[in-house]
């Protein structure tokens, strides 16, 4: 029902997007191959991904936002990918594992970013003022609060796509295979 396209078999409007992804990443992940069935979704995802790279959040902070959303949305496709990307961003191994298991991060500022992202997701964006205040007290800005929303939007596209399509995990991240733990370790 959900084929895996490439830059030669995808619907015409998706082909240049997949070609660009292949050029940048040296491969086309199965997520993007699946999204190509809906070229506007693929284009939105690729565009938003690029825009999020240009936010004021650091590479590690962007991975915290992504991986928190992956965890909360139980995306067994995205968690392995962002495990690899977190390593590439030079995130501490203990924090990579914390994000995979739902534990607290070692850096208090980063933990507040994780907690704020989780709160936005669980409250469907209706965070209480004290959540915002704590986020700001950790040194984050109003701009960064809005940038977190962009990161969540990106993960909503990918997590929901993977949920309905059953996207097969790519070979390059098989060693990071993941299922959400049955016991939550955080408060």
Image (cartoon, grey):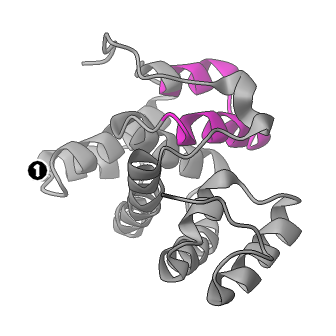
- Asked whether residue 96 is drawn in magenta, I would say yes
Q: Position of residue 77 (x, y in %)?
A: 55, 39
Image height check: is 180 above or below 18?
A: above
Query: Left of 123 or right of it: where is 41?
Result: right
Tell me where residue 35 sits by quadrant: bottom right
Tell me where residue 6 sits by quadrant: bottom right
- Count of numbered circles on the image: 1
Q: Can residue 109 be seen by looking at this rendering?
A: no
From which residue to which does the magenta span run? 76-99
Tell me where residue 184 sits by quadrant: top left
Q: Secondary structure at mark 1?
A: loop
Q: Which residue is mark 1?
A: 128
Residue drawn at (67%, 38%) of the image: 86
**Residue situated in front as seen by the camera: 18 or 137:** 18
**Residue situated in front as seen by the camera: 175 or 169:** 169
**Residue situated in front as seen by the camera: 113 or 45:** 45
Q: Can residue 144 be seen by looking at this rendering?
A: yes
**Residue situated in front as seen by the camera: 2 or 112:** 2
Residue drawn at (48%, 57%) of the image: 1
């Amino acid at each position: 029902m959900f084929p895996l396209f490439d830059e030669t078999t995808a619907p015409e409007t998706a082909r240049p997007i997949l070609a660009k992804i292949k050029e940048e990443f040296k491969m086309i992940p199965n997520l993007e191959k699946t999204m190509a069935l809906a070229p506007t979704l693929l284009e939105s995802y690729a565009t938003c991904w690029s825009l999020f790279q240009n936010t004021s959040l650091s590479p590690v902070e962007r991975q915290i936002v992504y991986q928190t959303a992956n965890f909360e949305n139980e995306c067994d496709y995205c968690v392995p990918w962002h495990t690899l990307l977190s390593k590439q961003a030079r995130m501490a191994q203990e924090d990579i594992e914390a994000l995979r298991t739902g534990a607290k991060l070692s850096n208090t500022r980063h933990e507040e970013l994780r907690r704020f992202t989780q709160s936005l997701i669980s409250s469907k964006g209706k965070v209480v003022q004290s959540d915002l205040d704590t986020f700001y007290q950790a040194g984050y800005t109003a701009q960064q609060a809005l940038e977190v929303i962009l990161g969540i939007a990106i993960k909503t596209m990918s997590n929901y796509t993977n949920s309905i399509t059953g996207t097969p995990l790519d070979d390059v991240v098989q060693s990071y295979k993941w299922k959400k733990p049955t016991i939550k370790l955080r408060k």
